[in-house]
Image: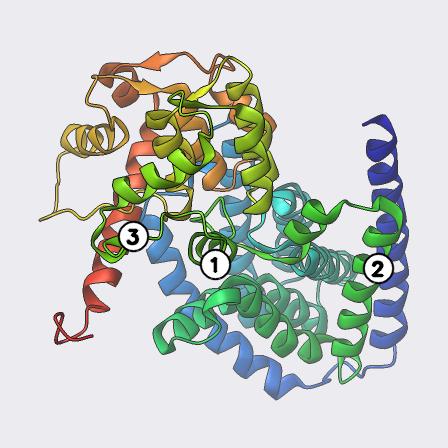
C-alpha cells in the first residue's frame, strides 16, 4: 500500500513537471501571435459562448446540485467560490471588452487566478468520464486558463488575452451544449461526457493557440496516460477503471454484468427463465453460489463475483468490510449485490411532487426496500459512491458503522442534498424512459 501511494505521488510530481512544460509551449506558441490573431473568429465564439452560458446558468439555478459538490463543507465552499468567481469573470470580461478598462480587465484576471482556477483544480479529482482522458484534459484546460489569466493580469488592456481567457473559461459551457446535443441525437452514449469535453476542447484550444493546439493537447493527454501506466503500474481492475467511462449511474460495468448473467451459465437452465421476475432470477444465482444449500454464501465468494463484474473499487472495499461481519443472506445479496446493475433510483413515479417533505418521504421509501422504517448506512454509502463521491468523503459524511440505521426524520433534516438530487434525477430518468418507450409495447 505504501509503495503504491509513493508511486502515485511520484506520478503527481511528474505531471506537475509536464504541466510546466505545457506552460512553456503555450508561451512559445502565443508569443508569435499578432495582437489581432483570429480576432473575428474569437469574437464570434465568445458571443455564441455567452448565449449558451445564460442557459447553463439558468439550468444550474433551477436544478439541484450534484451531492458530490455540496455534501461536505470544503466541497460546498469550493463550488460556491467556483460559481461566484466564474460569474465575476464572465461579467467583467464583457465590461472590459466594451469599455477597454484596464482596471476591470485586471479584476477579471484576478477572479480567474484567485477563484475559478484553484477551485477547478480542486474539483478535478472527482470528474466523471474516463479518468485516463478526463483528468489530463481538465488539467490542460485549467492550465491554459491560468496561463491566459496571468498574461491578462500583466497586460490588463490586452484584448488578445481577454478573449483567450474568456474562451477557455467557457469550455464547460460548450461541454454542456455538446452533452445535450449528443444525448438528444443518441450519439456516443457509452462515452457521452468524455466525448463532450474533448469536442469542446478541440474546438476552443485552436482558437487560443492556433493549429498546433490539438497536437499539443493530445500529446499532453497521451503522455499523462503513459506515465500513469508506467509509474503507478495499476492492477488489471484499477487499469480497467482508469480507462473506462465512469457514469453518474452505475457502480458495475453493465456490459460485463449482463454478459455474466447471460453467458456464464449461472442461471438455472429452465424453460421458464424468460418468465422469471428479477427477484426469482437473483434467487437462482444465489442458489448456485450457495453450494452447500445453507441459505448463506461466503463473503469471499461475493467479493470474487464483484471482481468479475469489475465493480467500482470503492464499493469493493466497502462490501469487503461489510461481508467480514458474517455470511451474506439472500436478502442482502439481492439488495446490495444483484441490483448493482441498475441505474441509481431506477423507479417509476407517477406525477410530480412539489412539497419537500413529500419528496424526501418518496426517496426514503424507495431506499427502505424492506419497509422497516429505517435506511441502512450501507445503502446510503453505496448510493453516494454510485454518484461519484470519493470513498474518504463518503466516510466523512456518513458514519463508518455499516450497521447504523437512519430514520426518516434524520434523513429529511440532515440529508437534503441526497433526497433533493435523487428525486430530481429520478424525474429526469423517468421522463427519458417514458420518451424512449416504443409505440407498440407488445411487439417483439
SS class, disc 2: helix
Q: Is residue 225 left or right of residue 315?
A: right
Quarter of the image containing the N terminus? top right
- Residue indicated by mark 2: 226
- Residue indicated by mark 1: 263
The span from disc 3 to disc 2 (Cα, nearest Å) is 48 Å
> Upstream in the sequence, badge 1 or badge 3?
1
Residue 128 location in percent, x, y? 55, 52
Return the residue nearer the eye: 205 or 367.
Answer: 367
Q: Are marks 1 and 2 in contact (CB under 8 Å)?
A: no
> Upstream in the sequence, badge 3 or badge 2?
2
One can see residue 106 in this view: no
Q: Residue furthest left?
A: 351
Q: Is residue 218 left or right of residue 329?
A: right
- Residue indicated by mark 3: 270
**Mark 2 closeness class: few <14, some 14–19, many ≥20 residues within 10 Å:** few
The span from disc 1 to disc 2 (Cα, nearest Å) is 34 Å
> Upstream in the sequence, badge 1 or badge 2?
2
SS class, disc 1: helix
Residue 333 lies in what quarter of the image?
top left
Q: Residue at x 65, y 76 (%)?
A: 202
Residue 219 location in percent, x, y? 82, 70
The span from disc 1 to disc 3 (Cα, nearest Å) is 15 Å
SS class, disc 3: loop
Residue 109 lies in what quarter of the image?
bottom right
For residue 408, above or below residue 150: above
Q: Are marks 3 and 2 in contact (CB under 8 Å)?
A: no
Residue 153 location in percent, x, y? 74, 56
Q: Residue at x 12, y 71 (%)?
A: 442
Amino acid at each position: 500500500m505504501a509503495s503504491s501511494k509513493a508511486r502515485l505521488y511520484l506520478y503527481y510530481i511528474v505531471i506537475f513537471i509536464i504541466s510546466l512544460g505545457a506552460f512553456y509551449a503555450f508561451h512559445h506558441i502565443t508569443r508569435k501571435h499578432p495582437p489581432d490573431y483570429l480576432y473575428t473568429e474569437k469574437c464570434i465564439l465568445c458571443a455564441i459562448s455567452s448565449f449558451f452560458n445564460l442557459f447553463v446558468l439558468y439550468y444550474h439555478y433551477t436544478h439541484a446540485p450534484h451531492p458530490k459538490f455540496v455534501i461536505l463543507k470544503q466541497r460546498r465552499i469550493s463550488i460556491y467560490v467556483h460559481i461566484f468567481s466564474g460569474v465575476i469573470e464572465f461579467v467583467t470580461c464583457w465590461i472590459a471588452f466594451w469599455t477597454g478598462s484596464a482596471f476591470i480587465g485586471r479584476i477579471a484576471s484576478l477572479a480567474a487566478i484567485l477563484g475559478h482556477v484553484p477551485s477547478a483544480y480542486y474539483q478535478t479529482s472527482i470528474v466523471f468520464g474516463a479518468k485516463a482522458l478526463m483528468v489530463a484534459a481538465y488539467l490542460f484546460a485549467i492550465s491554459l486558463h491560468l496561463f491566459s489569466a496571468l498574461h491578462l493580469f500583466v497586460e490588463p488592456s490586452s484584448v488578445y488575452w481577454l478573449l483567450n481567457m474568456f474562451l477557455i473559461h467557457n469550455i464547460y459551457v460548450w461541454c454542456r451544449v455538446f452533452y445535450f446535443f449528443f444525448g438528444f441525437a443518441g450519439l456516443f452514449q457509452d462515452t457521452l461526457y468524455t466525448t463532450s469535453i474533448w469536442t469542446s476542447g478541440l474546438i476552443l484550444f485552436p482558437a487560443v493557440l492556433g493549429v498546433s493546439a490539438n497536437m499539443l493537447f493530445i500529446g499532453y493527454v497521451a503522455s499523462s496516460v503513459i506515465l500513469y501506466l508506467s509509474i503507478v503500474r495499476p492492477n488489471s481492475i484499477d487499469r480497467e477503471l482508469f480507462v473506462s467511462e465512469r457514469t453518474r449511474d452505475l457502480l458495475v460495468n453493465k456490459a460485463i454484468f449482463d454478459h455474466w448473467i447471460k453467458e456464464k451459465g449461472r442461471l438455472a437452465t429452465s424453460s421458464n427463465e424468460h418468465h422469471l421476475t428479477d427477484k426469482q432470477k437473483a434467487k437462482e444465482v444465489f442458489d448456485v453460489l450457495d453450494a452447500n444449500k445453507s441459505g448463506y454464501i461466503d463473503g469471499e465468494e461475493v467479493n470474487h463475483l464483484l471482481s468479475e463484474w469489475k465493480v467500482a473499487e470503492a464499493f469493493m472495499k466497502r462490501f469487503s468490510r461489510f461481508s467480514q461481519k458474517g455470511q451474506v443472506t439472500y436478502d442482502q445479496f439481492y439488495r446490495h449485490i444483484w441490483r448493482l446493475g441498475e441505474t441509481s433510483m431506477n423507479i417509476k413515479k407517477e406525477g410530480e411532487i412539489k412539497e419537500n417533505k413529500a419528496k424526501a418521504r418518496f426517496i426514503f421509501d424507495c431506499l427502505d426496500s424492506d419497509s422497516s422504517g429505517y435506511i441502512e448506512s450501507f445503502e446510503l454509502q453505496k448510493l453516494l459512491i454510485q454518484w461519484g463521491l470519493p470513498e474518504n468523503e463518503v466516510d466523512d459524511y456518513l458514519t463508518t458503522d455499516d450497521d447504523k440505521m437512519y430514520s426518516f426524520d434524520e434523513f429529511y433534516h440532515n440529508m437534503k442534498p441526497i433526497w433533493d438530487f435523487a428525486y430530481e434525477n429520478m424525474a429526469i430518468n423517468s421522463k427519458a424512459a417514458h420518451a424512449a418507450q416504443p409505440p407498440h409495447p407488445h411487439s417483439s
